[in-house]
Amino acid sequence: MKNVTLKDVAKAAGVSYATVSRALSGSPQIGRETRERIVKLCDEMGYTTNYVARSMVKKKTDLIGLVVPSIDNSFDAELAYYAEMSARAHGYNIMLCNSGPDLQQEKTVVKLLLGRQVDGILIVPQGPQTYENIRAYADQVPIVFLSENLRDQPQSYVATDNSHGTYIGTRYLYELGHRDILYFGRRQSTTHQLRAEGYIRACRELGLEQRFFNSDFSSSSIANGYQLARELFEREMDYTAIFASTDSNALGIMKAADERGIDIPGQLSLIGFDNIQMTSLPRIELTTIEQPKRDMAVQAVDMLRDKIENGRQGYIHQILLPSLVKRSTCRALD
Amino acid sequence: MKNVTLKDVAKAAGVSYATVSRALSGSPQIGRETRERIVKLCDEMGYTTNYVARSMVKKKTDLIGLVVPSIDNSFDAELAYYAEMSARAHGYNIMLCNSGPDLQQEKTVVKLLLGRQVDGILIVPQGPQTYENIRAYADQVPIVFLSENLRDQPQSYVATDNSHGTYIGTRYLYELGHRDILYFGRRQSTTHQLRAEGYIRACRELGLEQRFFNSDFSSSSIANGYQLARELFEREMDYTAIFASTDSNALGIMKAADERGIDIPGQLSLIGFDNIQMTSLPRIELTTIEQPKRDMAVQAVDMLRDKIENGRQGYIHQILLPSLVKRSTCRALD
DNA sequence: AAATGAGTTGTAAACGTTTGCGATTCCTGG
DNA sequence: CCAGGAATCGCAAACGTTTACAACTCATTT
């Protein structure tokens, strides 16, 4: 149970413990044969270097705080997966925190992470208020925001070109022959504003009428999409396609449509946004806009590492291109 | 950028830094008015205690290592969510590691966690070999295994009563009138052996013929379920229901059935195991056996805390009861 | 009034590393 | 044979806490 320490192997090897440290750290100022003797002894004795002691003197923990709204959300989980893999490949470990439902908790966990002396924080925001919420800590530790588009804020982030995503999505619908496309979902956060803008831009270019259906209180959940879609389907259906601002919303729409006997894509084409895992399921096969989650995650840790290791000041806005993934919820009109 | 330290506030308050430490830790041996003065000063100066320094002297990091096969797997993600929430509520933070595809990486990350001086490790195993794989570390740090049933191994774990799950599932099918039930999926790991056993037990009690379809190389993925099901559906369909040992497999079966024009539940009833998020989706609505993931996670961290804080020796096998969640892939025969 | 004791504060060691600097050894060239 | 330097190695400080122990201040008791 007792951990073997530097001092222990030093005594066993008959050298000072500074020498042992140097042998393991690959310092040049040490003899070849002593080094070999020591490293051999080290794994014989089962020595592993104590990271907290090292962190103490080096003033670097090799720890990255990852805060996500909720890790059981598959979007967050995918980002977390790639982030952890990439971070570990570069010698970092991930300290995970759910920022839970409210801003209070989000603030609490970054304060916690600060106390943990993490070298940097990767945060996928709960929403547009996150930036304000934790801005105060931005000068205490490198932070990069992930997935939420902060527009012109003086903070580093990586996000997808949300506007371009909806743009190519509605163009795709247009090419399929659709002329009446309804945009469904949130418009309040920057990310969702941008998505709406892409739709608007495409409509302008193509001479399409813009139609919106949303509520101020809409959230990006299946349940909410379902509720709203039920209301929507009460009215006359004077459109042939729906662009849902979120896959989850699209899934809710799909459910409401099924209940109502509306055939997708027979009577109604549907396209989502995010390409979360669920969309590729049999019977779902939702056509959607892919956010390149893997690239986003690794670029975010790269960016964070650049700040940490090279002390890079200033901020970068890294925008990645989304792509259309065609599945089976859109059909060509004749 | 410079962190304010105990010494700083001590100087500002005109006391020794031991006093400051005592003021914050709630030690009884300090005057009321000095304490109040100091805590006030502390948050004025923005002091946060440095956890790595504290860990150093206390020989306790308040860190729990969480290793999961892949956090983007929704089962792992759900467990991780509840584990993190519960751990944090008790003053612990989570260090997250994906144990990746192979046993080598699994071993690597627990060694890493050891170096990080975590107080304990929560591990959801890749499979039955995990126990052997990391047994060597079991006396260096408290470990509890999560979700994999280790049977009689001298290690603490919390898992569901897998056998009972399949037992109530096939009884349910029986009550619905099914007499020819095919068990589909893996049987090699302890967990899957137990699931098969529950099915066998129910069959014996009910006088049903046992029928198995599986391959030695089957994995619990949608793709694999799909492949196997395609083979299966080549043969004569002399059963009215399938019990899939895994939701993912069930989803694959569903896809193959759809392709083949087999109506679920019209011609074939289907039941899965795990109750992963995807199963509740519209158009899926898979009847399945729920693993109480939330309870599993919090009990696992409770168990780990008991080992850490009370130095509890020995091991506990905590078995939780699964439950049937009826959705729409099973129908009553007439 | 002195002794006792409770209550409060300071001193210093300890946790396990890394690393600058000085000390030692050894080799090399003049 | 000796000076000089390179190659190794040890010493000790430092990182920011916690905590046992000593020390001090008062009030209380005898």
Image: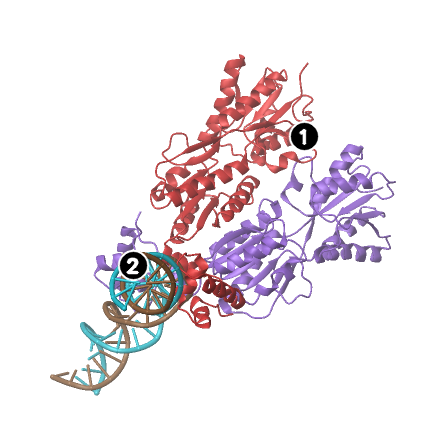
Chain colours: A purple, B red, C cyan, D brown
Name which residue type carries label 2. Leu
> Front-most of D18 and B278?
D18
> Badge 1 local density, few (<14 within 10 Å), some, or many (20+)?
few
Locate residue A59, reporting x and y percent: 43, 65
Q: Which of the chains bears the disc numbered 1?
A: B
Residue B55: which disc?
none
Q: Is residue B138 above or below residue B250?
A: below
Q: Is residue A188 left or right of residue C15?
A: right
Q: Depth-wise, is mark 1 or mark 2 nearer the camera?
A: 2
Determine whether the residue tagged by mark 2 lies in a helix, strand or loop.
helix
Locate residue A272, reporting x and y percent: 72, 46
- Residue pointed to by mark 1: B259
Cβ–Cβ under 8 Å for marks 1 and 2: no
Residue appearing at x 60%, y 32% in the figure: B226
Q: Is residue A228 left or right of residue B203?
A: right
Locate residue B104, reporting x and y percent: 41, 45
> Front-most of B63 and B44?
B44
Residue A6: which disc?
2
Name which residue type carries label 1. Glu
> Front-most of B159 and A106?
A106
Count the labels in the image: 2
